[in-house]
């Protein structure tokens, strides 16, 4: 991944408009380098946001990481490619393609890619 400045994205009101959308994940990941910047060895982009639900993609380089954090909603991590280590206070899991990990709201966790990795994250905020 290059570390160049991000190009402007389509504004959210346009990107999330309409009652139906088809998102080609291959194209979304291909567009990511032009729309994001590399932070801690990863890039990310929100694909959809409606009400309490947000869906985003993440692309990690080997050893790319997100330091310990917590989310205010339920998190669903879906690994599409690669190998992602998810560490919580209770466990360490290595997620491979087709694995899902569900985290309850407020669970501190960190992420580290053990090889180039693509992930879909869905967060459902609590009311």
Image (cartoon, rainbow, N blue to C red):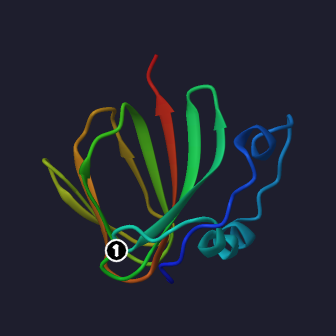
Which residue in the structure is indicated by mark 1? 64
Residue that lies at the very extreme toward the left in this rendered image: 89
The image shows residue 49 at horizontal and vertical percentages of 64, 38
In the rendered structure, the answer to whether residue 64 lies left or right of residue 80 reads left
* Residue at left offset 45%, top offset 71%: 38
Q: Quadrant of residue 12?
A: top right
In the rendered structure, the answer to whether residue 21 lies left or right of residue 32 reads right
The image shows residue 97 at horizontal and vertical percentages of 48, 72
State whether residue 7 is above or below residue 107: below
* Residue at left offset 68%, top offset 76%: 30
* Numbered marks: total: 1
* Residue at left offset 83%, top offset 47%: 21
* Residue at left offset 44%, top offset 82%: 116
Residue that lies at the very extreme toward the top in this rendered image: 127
Taking depth in this image into account, of 32 and 103 the one nearest to the observer is 32
Residue that lies at the very extreme toward the front in this rendered image: 5
In the rendered structure, the answer to whether residue 101 lies left or right of residue 43 reads left
């Amino acid at each position: 991944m290059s570390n160049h400045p991000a190009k402007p994205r389509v504004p959210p009101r346009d990107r999330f408009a309409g009652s139906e959308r088809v998102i080609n994940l291959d194209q979304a990941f291909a567009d990511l380098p032009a729309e994001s910047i590399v932070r801690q060895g990863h890039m990310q982009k929100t694909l959809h946001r409606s009400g309490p639900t947000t869906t985003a993609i993440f692309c990690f380089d080997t050893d790319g990481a997100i330091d310990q954090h917590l989310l205010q909603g339920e998190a669903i991590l879906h690994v599409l490619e690669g190998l992602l280590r998810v560490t919580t206070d209770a466990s360490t899991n290595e997620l491979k393609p087709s694995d899902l990990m569900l985290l309850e709201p407020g669970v501190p966790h960190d992420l580290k890619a053990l090889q180039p990795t693509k992930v879909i994250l869905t967060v459902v905020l609590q009311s």
